[in-house]
Every structure is written in C-alpha cells, then in structure tokens.
Image (spheres, rainbow, N blue to C red):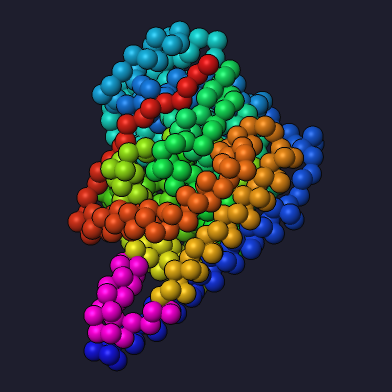
Amino acid sequence: MDLALRLVEKILIIYFTLYFVIDIALYVYSIYRYFARNNGKDENLSYADYPISIIVPAYNEEVSLVDCVNMLAELDYPEFEIIVVNDGSKDNTMKVLEQSYDLQEIHKEDKPVLEAQKVKHFYQVKDKNILILDKENGGKADAINAGINFCNGDYICTIDADSILDDKALKQVIKPFINNDNTIVTGGQLAVANDVVLQNNKVVNSKVPKNIWVQWQIIEYVKSFMISRIGLSKINALLIMSGAFSVFKKEDILNVGGFLSKINTHPYIESIMGSGNQTVCEDMEIVVRLWRYKKEHQLKAKAEFIPEAICWTEVPEKPQNLFKQRSRWHQGLGETLKLHKKMLFEPKYGVTGLIGLPYYLVFEFLSPLIKLLSLAFIVMAAVYGVINLKWVTLLLVSVMLTTAIIMSSITVVIEYWSQKNAESNRDALRYKSFWDWIWLLFSGILAEFTYAFYKIAAQIDGVVNFMKKKHDWKKFERKGVQNV
C-alpha cells in the first residue's frame, strides 16, 4: 500500500506541477499582452463593408430581452441588423415585445439553408432594422440557425438575451476579420451584469455586489478571460468563445453546417459525427468544428479573444442555479471532446489537435476527477501515516500566494489599461476603490478553500450527466438590470 501511495503521490505532483506551470505561463503572457498590444488608430477601417447580423435567441426572457434589444439598437456600428428569435417561450416574452415595439407582421419566403424548427410568424419593428422570428421551440442552437436562415449580414454575432454590450464592442470584435481574412471567430470579455444600472441603454454604475456567489464569479471571469483566453488565443489553441458574445463569418458557419441541433442533418455534420447529435454547450462545439473544417481542408484559421470588447451578462445568484450552470458547462465540454475525439493527438489538426484539445481534456474535463483523487489520496495517506505534512502545508500556502499574486497584479494591469479606455470599460472591472480591490482579493483567496470544492462537485455532476447522456439546458431565472 505504501508503494501505491508513493506512486500516486508522484503522479499527482507531476500533474499539479504542470497545471501550475501552464497557469503561470498564461498569466505571464497576459501581462505581456497588455503592455505590448498595438493601440493604433482605426480611422482608416471601413466598417460599412462588414455588415453584421446580431442574432438574439430568446427562451423565457421577458425580464431582460427589451433592455438587450434597446441597447443593441444604439450600438456604434454603421451597418447591422438585429434578429430576435423567440424560441417558443412559455412566459410573456412575445407579449412584452408586442407591448414595447410597433410590430408589423410581414411575409418571408422560406430559406431553409439550415434545418430549424418552423417559424410561425415574422415581425418587423417599425422604423428600426429589427426582425423578430416567432418559432416553435427547438433549443438555442436551433434558434440561432433559424436566425441565420433569414439574416442579411456577412458576419454573424450571437448574443444572449440578458447581455449588454459596450457601445464600441462590435467595432472591436470585427477588427480581426478586417485585418486577417483567416479569422474564424472572435469574442470579447464578459463582465458580470448583476446589480449594474443602465441609463440611456449604457452602464452607468457597476458596484461590487454583496452576494458572495456573484463575487466569486467576478473573480472567476477575470481569471478565465483576462488570463487563460489571452494566452490560448495567441497559440491558436482557443477552442471556447462564449455564446454570450461571439462573432463568426457567415460563410464559414454555412460551410460547417450551422450550430449543432438534433434535427440538423447538414452533409458535413453527418460526415464527421453522424445524425441526431446535440450538445448542451453549442458555443464550444461550433468553434471546434470550425477548426476541424479548416484543418481538413488545409485552410489557415485564427480564433481571437478581444479583451477590450466588453459584454455584461447576468450570472446566477443562487448556489443551486450556479451548480446547474457549471454542471451543464462541464457536460458540454465532455460532449464536444467526444464528438471530435478524432482530432485528439492527431498531427494533421495542428495545434488544435496536439495542444488545444489535449489541454481541455487533461486540465479541464478531467481536472475535477483528479482533484477528487487528490483529496482521497490525502485522506488515505493520513490514515496510513505516510502523509507529508510539510508538503501539504506548502501546497496550501502556495495556493493562497498564487491567488493573491495573480489577482492583485492582473487587476492592477487591467486598471492601468482601463484608464486609457472609455468609462464603460472601467465599469466592467467592478471595483472602484482600494477597499473594493482588497475585498475581491480576500474573496478570491477564500474561494480557493470554499467555492473551489463547490465547483468540483458541480463539474463531477456534469461528468455524470455526460456519462448518462442527459440533455437538460438547466436555464436559471433572470433578475434583469436596473434602468434609471
């Protein structure tokens, strides 16, 4: 037994050492990225040549949808349309739209480019470039596909119905497409929208929420978006772009068959994974499929995360809802890895197959299981009296110090960067004073010994649901933002 424990100990040390080294490397690069970025002027860019169709899938979004659409209508971009897709909502979503806008029912010829559930009614908002599709329920991926069928833009922006964009966010996320024709997807930084205040469709106040669960998610978002995604984007290993705010080239989306839904029988989808497949996290799957298509056709591709583009999105405030969301995310990760397992460790898929997918498999999907194994190992080692208390103590102290160093320095860097940007970017930070910053730092350290275990439990639940092939989107109720 002693030999077995020592063997497990060595394996866990290697794993967590690699985990630590990768995190530090991504962190160091994110710092470098901020200071080395190009802040060139954009006067010579012709945005009008890059029309965007913003697709807003909505299911039971009566609380937040109108605020979202009103905000989108006032974005600083020369050529865009808004397509709201009511995906068979069971609440008052459609009624709220009818009360808020002057809707004119119009006739649209069927354009079945992508398979989707039937659209029952089409409405045009009078004097605005807003189209509303009232369709039968088919899920988020199906709703986006329906929107794509009736869009006119060359670029597709998907945004959640509870999201609020910074005024210039569209210009920022379209720039990589203008500068590099090989770009397949871009996305911006997500900021927590809970307790923000809107005035004239713009965020004017975003104090630190009192809810500790929301605070932990703020810190989680800073780590995920401002550290991991910047580094992964650089090496072309970024396989996740948040469904809350992403932009794609319409031509690419059509080539790969649109978003994955159970009724989608596009030839490319059937050729690589068969028919009848679906996932609870369509945003990751579509990005991986885009990479796969480009590599199989020997085409260059680039996915780019844009930290300057801000999108506020509402996060769960109740622990049970947060548990369901994190479980769903982890289940979706497993589903995507399974659907595209052919790419794993396959040289023909380049960095995506050799680094990107293995990273998400080993250090993301399997991570909660390995952490659970680590806890079991510590208990077993303690029972048999072979635990190295100095090693465990050093590990705990290292976790605290690493969290403190990363959180403090990255927030200082973001603060430095934000001073050179619009006020709306500063609002995304969610801390306005030294004491706000200290409290978030303390909250982040506390999370490593509380929330971290809660998240492990949720992720393991996601693994179980993945194994059982459950398909439940587990939507949480929205509170909406405050308008003044």
Q: Residue at x 51, y 37 (%)?
A: 208
Q: 301 or 97, which lies in front?
A: 97
Residue lying farthest to the bottom in this orientation: 3
For residue 302, say whether it is visible: no
Q: Position of residue 88 (x, y in %)?
A: 29, 26
Q: Position of residue 150 (x, y in %)?
A: 45, 28
Q: Position of residue 87 (x, y in %)?
A: 33, 28
Q: Residue at x 63, y 29 (%)?
A: 167
The quarter holding residue 60 reads top left
Residue 14 to residue 316: above or below: below
Residue 199 to residue 332: above or below: above
Give the magenta-colored segment's residue range: 369-391
The quarter holding residue 148 reads top left
Residue lying farthest to the left in this orientation: 468
The tally of labels here is 0
Q: Position of residue 463 (x, y in %)?
A: 28, 59
Q: Main secondary structure of the magenta part?
A: helix
Q: Residue at x 67, y 51 (%)?
A: 413
Q: Quadrant of the N terminus?
A: bottom left
